[in-house]
């Protein structure tokens, strides 16, 4: 059987059958093919009892859509990578003399960086050669040409030092035009080096394989030498990282000079920068094998800064260490350690010894990021870590009687820190955002101010021993009003269960939502028994953990985070290289808590970037499933992205699915009252997510083509118009979201009919995915609470949270996906994007037309929001399915999707124009469309 008929089953009837015409009977056209365009030519004939019937054959047909020939289809034999023998040997033909002449001219002047949009360079020669990622140089370097693609934002152009060999003269060859169209190009015999004068260097040769005739091969005769090659991501991230990697092991302190000074003399000299330059030196300092010269360009100098006296360390001074590459001639280049060093044994030291008050020490020092740290003179390290909780994990629960607040501080947040050997002084410090709800001008500060509310420090060893700790307390007394409460902390296998309950007066009740409305001053009725205590339920607590051990630098996982992994890098349809990769995501570690995740100077030791590129080849089912849900939408006058959210029928054989996009992408606003009228849009092209699209290096198909896209009818049944508020005061609200139905079975049938099996399999996989969760997210949004906490916090109570998002879309019809660890959650929307400081941005954000309608989900498979607008190449705005906005003294709420509260009758929801309402109308019209799953089984927001 031929290869074609091993894939396709051809028709037969009785003794007759259709097969390909025998080789010797075919028309000459069938001997042609085009691997670069994916075309071949077939001719079919009639067979009787297995014998071809001469003269009974069809015309020649063109078969399109085959996999396209690419450079990775050619591999060296019996070795890791190409060498010269793969291009220059007797078994290969040489190209024409004209081509040979062009190849022989090539030198370093023909190459330039393939920069990111904000002009960052991404080449670390040593890492590339160590990882043997020679095939990735095609993505990291470009050939200089008037025709080469330029990714750089005109507003972000930075002129970098030339990478060319100064001994090379410019050539007349244009590799992009003269060679690349006809030849696959390979970097081989690649070598790297580093010197202070030339930075990173690469030398290599280029090999060429003819695309039409792979037997034609050639290679550059001379080595090509590039210099000044750097990875800007490393230069920016490693500056803080190397300075914060300093411990006492790196410090050499002049003991003679130190013992000649009193404590006060030392402090004065540090303050006025007159301390002898030989007082301290730093030795053996590197980060990820890079030293100060490689990171900063020179050795610079160090000095102690910010001296502090602490009462419980009477013979010592706490200082930070500062570094300046300009030796402190430029005030703007100074970097300080976030850690402090205890300097002791001064001339006036006494023999007085007492146990230090570690809480006092930690309260007196500062930190830029999420950990306070002191290297003590006894070689121990004191820490206070600010715990960055997932924002869902600071949602507290109020019982139905409004008497008891409960919460679980999950084990994942303290396990790696406290459940290990040789920990001392272990404390868990909670600040609870609660107090008496007396509505005067100080109502907010009583709840949220760092020294108000409730502050509790739990001794970890005591909690481990007793399992349960109870504390009685009172709220602040205001105008003779005071409320007694009891706190309970119960250590369980899941974490620490917390309970707050009012005691002594059953008339007093707790309230915890709509913070701005609930706590606004009310001189006429400042106190109400039914709202006696305010306990913020959307952001109930902030947490820090103190401990002491003998570990100077802590790492909590084996795999490096944010690794510059050239072997696993991606190259997008935007022709941008993306080299940051997290290997442990392939083990399910995405969104797992790491105590170092909020410390940027722990770049490879646990830090989580705000936003990361979602590599298509990550082996995490959440990544694969999301890419399987994201579809390209293309119709006359509009393009965008849709998210398939779940099945529309309980019948497993029914292929109808719900999907979401923007109203401005797909709309039919006559659906408000009756979703069955005039709703079908006759032809929309839907495309799929794949990593096989064409880019400037690799051959591939365009996103909108017959292989990956299919024209289909769609059924928009709700388009966000005429939304009614919960209090019915507004019946004309608009949200830019559309729900629509698509029959996936119809798509699969069309694709199979056209022989597009790969795309048909994509849609079959889509049908197998579980429904996304829906819930009442944002009903009491945390925006207002978190803003109040920020205004009234100190370092310990600052609201630091991560979000855990995933989204994939098609800006300019080019696929891109993101993993979001942190983003801004606003009042009725959320924002994703870059920082204003370009040195803090490590992930390009592709923002173009076509991103509209992109659905955002979380790591638990819950729909969160839909992107509808953007600031070009910088940020994206995404809208929730529930709006809760405080305006003119009250909170106005809109339940766009019609998600019921627990035990609420769906028919009692005021918004009769909700998405759920329209699905119920569809169900009455066509019972095969089921009642929406977010009504049957709505999820609590802080539950999986």
Image (cartoon, grey):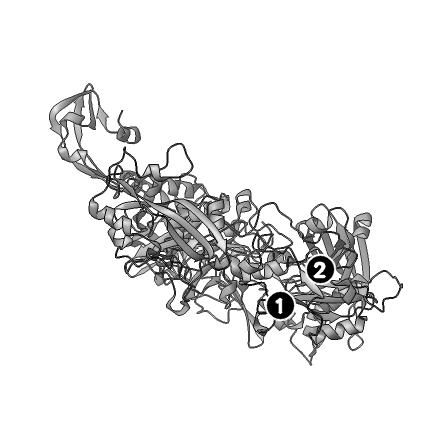
Marks 2 & 1, CB-CB < 8 Å contact: no
Residue beneath disc 1: 785
Position above or below: 912 against 491: below
Mark 1, residues whose alpha carbon is within 10 Å: few (<14), some, or many (≥20)? many
Mark 2, residues whose alpha carbon is within 10 Å: few (<14), some, or many (≥20)? few
Q: Could you tell me how many numbered marks the image carries?
A: 2
Give the percent coordinates (x, y) of residue 18: 20, 27
Q: Residue furthest bottom?
A: 523
Residue beneath disc 2: 252
Q: Residue furthest front?
A: 167
Which residue is nearer to you in this view: 897 or 837? 837
Whether residue 927 is visible, yes or no, is no
Give the percent coordinates (x, y) of residue 216: 25, 39
Give the percent coordinates (x, y) of residue 533: 72, 67
Give the percent coordinates (x, y) of residue 123: 45, 54
SS of the residue at dot 1?
A: helix
Whether residue 851 is visible, yes or no, is yes
């Amino acid at each position: 059987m031929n290869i074609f008929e091993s894939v396709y089953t051809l028709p037969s009837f009785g003794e007759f059958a259709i097969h390909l015409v025998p080789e010797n009977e075919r028309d000459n056209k069938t001997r042609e093919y085009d691997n670069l365009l994916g075309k071949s030519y077939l001719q079919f004939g009639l067979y009787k009892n297995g014998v071809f019937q001469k003269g009974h054959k069809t015309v020649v047909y063109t078969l399109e859509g085959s996999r396209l020939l690419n450079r990775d289809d050619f591999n060296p034999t019996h070795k890791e990578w190409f060498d010269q023998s793969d291009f220059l040997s007797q078994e290969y033909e040489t190209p024409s003399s004209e081509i040979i002449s062009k190849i022989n001219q090539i030198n370093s002047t023909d190459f330039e960086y393939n920069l990111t949009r904000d002009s960052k360079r991404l080449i670390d020669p040593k890492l590339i050669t160590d990882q043997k990622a020679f095939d990735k140089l095609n993505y990291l370097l470009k050939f200089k040409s008037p025709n080469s693609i330029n990714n750089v934002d005109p507003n972000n152009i930075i002129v970098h030092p030339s990478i060319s060999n100064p001994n090379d003269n410019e050539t007349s060859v244009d590799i992009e035009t003269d060679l690349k169209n006809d030849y696959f190009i390979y970097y081989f015999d690649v070598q790297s080096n580093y010197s202070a004068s030339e930075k990173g260097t690469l030398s290599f040769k280029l090999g060429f394989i003819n695309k039409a005739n792979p037997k034609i091969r050639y290679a550059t005769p001379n080595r090509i030498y590039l210099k000044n090659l750097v990875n800007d991501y490393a230069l920016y991230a490693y500056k803080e990282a190397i300075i914060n990697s300093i411990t006492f092991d790196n410090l050499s302190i002049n003991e003679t000079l130190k013992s000649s000074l009193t404590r006060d003399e030392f402090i004065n000299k540090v303050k006025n920068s007159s301390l002898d330059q030989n007082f301290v030196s730093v030795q053996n300092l590197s980060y990820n094998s890079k030293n100060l010269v490689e990171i900063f360009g020179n050795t610079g100098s160090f000095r102690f800064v910010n001296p502090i006296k602490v009462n419980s360390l009477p013979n010592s001074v706490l200082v930070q260490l500062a570094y300046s590459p300009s030796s402190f001639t430029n005030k703007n280049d100074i970097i300080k350690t976030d850690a402090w060093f205890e300097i002791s044994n001064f001339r006036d030291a006494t023999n007085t010894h007492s146990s230090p008050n570690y809480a006092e020490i930690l309260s007196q020092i500062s930190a830029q990021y999420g950990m306070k740290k002191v290297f003590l003179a006894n070689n121990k390290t004191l820490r206070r870590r600010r715990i960055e909780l997932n924002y869902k994990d600071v949602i507290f629960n109020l019982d139905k009687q409004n008497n008891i607040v409960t919460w679980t501080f999950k084990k994942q947040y303290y396990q790696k820190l406290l459940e290990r050997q040789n920990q001392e002084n272990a404390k868990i410090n909670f600040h609870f955002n609660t107090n008496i709800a007396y509505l005067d001008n100080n109502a907010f500060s009583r709840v949220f101010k760092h020294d108000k509310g409730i502050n509790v420090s739990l001794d970890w060893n005591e909690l481990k021993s007793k399992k349960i700790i109870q504390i009685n307390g009172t709220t602040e007394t205001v105008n003779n009003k005071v409320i007694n409460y009891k706190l309970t902390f119960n250590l369980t296998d899941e974490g620490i269960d917390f309970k707050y309950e009012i005691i002594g007066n059953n008339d007093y009740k707790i309230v915890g939502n709509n913070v701005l409305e609930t706590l606004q001053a009310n001189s006429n009725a400042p106190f109400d028994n039914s709202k006696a205590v305010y306990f913020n339920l959307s952001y109930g607590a902030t947490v820090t953990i103190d401990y002491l051990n003998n570990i100077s630098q802590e790492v909590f996982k084996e795999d490096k985070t944010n690794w510059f992994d050239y072997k696993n890098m991606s190259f997008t349809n935007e022709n941008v290289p993306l080299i940051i990769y997290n290997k442990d995501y392939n083990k399910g570690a995405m969104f797992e808590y790491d105590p170092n995740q909020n410390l940027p100077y722990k770049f490879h030791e646990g830090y989580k970037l705000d936003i990361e590129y979602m590599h298509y080849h990550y082996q995490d089912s959440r990544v694969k499933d999301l890419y399987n849900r994201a579809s390209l939408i293309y119709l006359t006058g509009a393009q965008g992205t849709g998210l398939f959210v779940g099945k529309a029928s309980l019948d497993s054989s029914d292929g109808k699915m719900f999907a979401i996009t923007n109203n401005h992408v797909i709309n039919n606003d006559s659906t408000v009252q009756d979703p069955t009228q005039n709703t079908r849009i006759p032809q929309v092209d839907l495309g799929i997510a794949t990593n096989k699209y064409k880019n400037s290096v690799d051959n591939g198909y365009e996103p909108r083509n017959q292989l990956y896209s299919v024209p289909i009818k769609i059924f928009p049944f709700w388009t966000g118009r005429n939304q009614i508020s919960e209090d019915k005061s507004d019946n004309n609200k608009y949200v830019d979201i559309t729900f629509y139905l698509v029959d996936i079975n119809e798509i699969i049938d069309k694709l199979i009919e056209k022989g597009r099996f790969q795309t048909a399999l994509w849609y079959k996989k889509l049908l197998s995915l579980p429904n996304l969760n829906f819930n009442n997210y944002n009903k009491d949004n945390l925006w207002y609470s978190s803003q109040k906490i920020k205004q009234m916090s100190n370092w310990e109570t600052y609201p630091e949270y991560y979000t855990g998002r995933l989204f994939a879309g098609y800006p300019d019809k080019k696929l891109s996906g993101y993993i979001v660890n942190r983003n801004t959650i606003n009042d009725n929307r959320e924002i994703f994007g870059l920082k204003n400081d370009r040195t803090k941005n490590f992930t390009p954000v592709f923002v173009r037309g076509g991103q509209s309608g992109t659905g955002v989900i979380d790591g638990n498979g819950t729909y969160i929001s839909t992107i509808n607008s953007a600031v070009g190449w910088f940020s994206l705005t995404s809208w929730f399915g529930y709006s809760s906005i405080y305006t003119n003294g009250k909170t106005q709420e809109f339940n766009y999707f019609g998600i019921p509260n627990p035990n609420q009758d769906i028919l009692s929801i005021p918004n009769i124009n909700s998405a759920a309402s329209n699905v119920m109308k569809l169900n009455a019209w066509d019972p095969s469309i089921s009642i929406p799953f977010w009504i049957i089984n709505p999820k609590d927001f802080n539950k999986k």
